[in-house]
Image (cartoon, grey):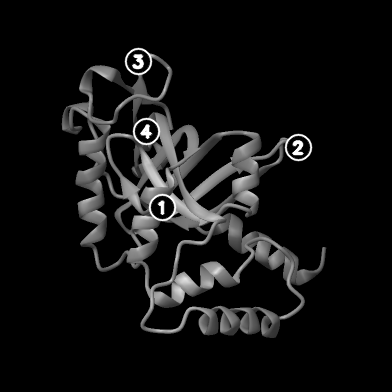
Amino acid sequence: MDSTSGELGHELAEHRVDYSDAGLDAADLAPTPLEQFQRWWGDAAHDPRITEPNAVVLATAGADGLPDARTVLLKGADARGFVFYTNLGSAKARQLAAVPHAALVLPWHPQQRQVRVRGSAEQVDRAESAAYFASRPRGSQLGAHASRQSAEVASREELARAYEEVAARFPEPGPVPLPDGWGGYLVRPVEVELWVGRRSRLHDRLVYLSVSGEPAPLDDASAWRVVRRQP
């Protein structure tokens, strides 16, 4: 190990953040996971310290059993679950085809909060994907046509050429159609965890668990029970 590696290792080991002691009690929770998520989302969305409150870490695993994770943007949350969009030929899409389960983490660090979700994953229907795609900025729409997400590309210039070709194919002011290989995924939770940092690493973890053990409507209080987990 060179000295630089040793210094970095020491710096990482010694870096710590002291959490407040605000805490979270079961009595503070909303009766349903959807209402509770809406409360916390409202706090995060209006907090200027959080630049992308809908940035969510998506974890998947493929047929090889290797876990994978990346940050995507959450674009929907309702009684069904949580929705994000992607290229349907991407690595994450291939993994979800092999193992249709996913985990999500919304890390709202400035508020010393996290939301963790585990559940099944399925594609949303094309009409829902098309409605969201139509709301995207034009540049993002063109980029979805130009990029074969997760595939190798020889250079940045090759990607730029693909974008320009798409822009020429769909000139303004005409619409950009939904690509055949692009759409949304719905994560239907079996558990939703609310995490709050506390002193001495004795964090609060309160979890909505599906009573049936299967994905359940997030707005149905009778379908969920709340447990406290040790940090």
Name the residue carrying label 4: 192
Question: Could you tell me how far apart the alpha carbons at marks 3 and 4 are, in whole angstroms?
Answer: 12 Å
Which residue is at a point 29% across and 21% down the rendered structure image? 224
Q: Is residue 70 above or below residue 168?
A: above
Instruction: Please tell me whether mark 1 sits on a helix, a strand or a loop.
Output: helix
**Three-letter code for the amino acid on which mark 2 is drawn:** Asp
Q: Is residue 199 above or below residue 138?
A: above
* Other residues around mark 3 within 10 Å, as few (<14) / some (14–19) / many (≥20): some
**Earlier-in-chain disc, 3 versus 2:** 2
Residue 211: mark: 3
Which residue is at a point 55% across and 44% down the rendered structure image? 59
**Three-letter code for the amino acid on which mark 3 is drawn:** Val
Name the residue carrying label 1: 129
Residue depth check, mark 3 versus mark 1: number of the one nearer the observer: 1
Which residue is at a point 38% across and 14% down the rendered structure image? 212
66 relative position to 201: left or right: right
Contact, mark 3 vs mark 1 (Cβ under 8 Å): no
Question: Could you tell me how far apart the alpha carbons at marks 4 and 2 are, in whole angstroms?
Answer: 27 Å
* Other residues around mark 1 within 10 Å, as few (<14) / some (14–19) / many (≥20): many
**Earlier-in-chain disc, 3 versus 4:** 4
Name the residue carrying label 2: 64
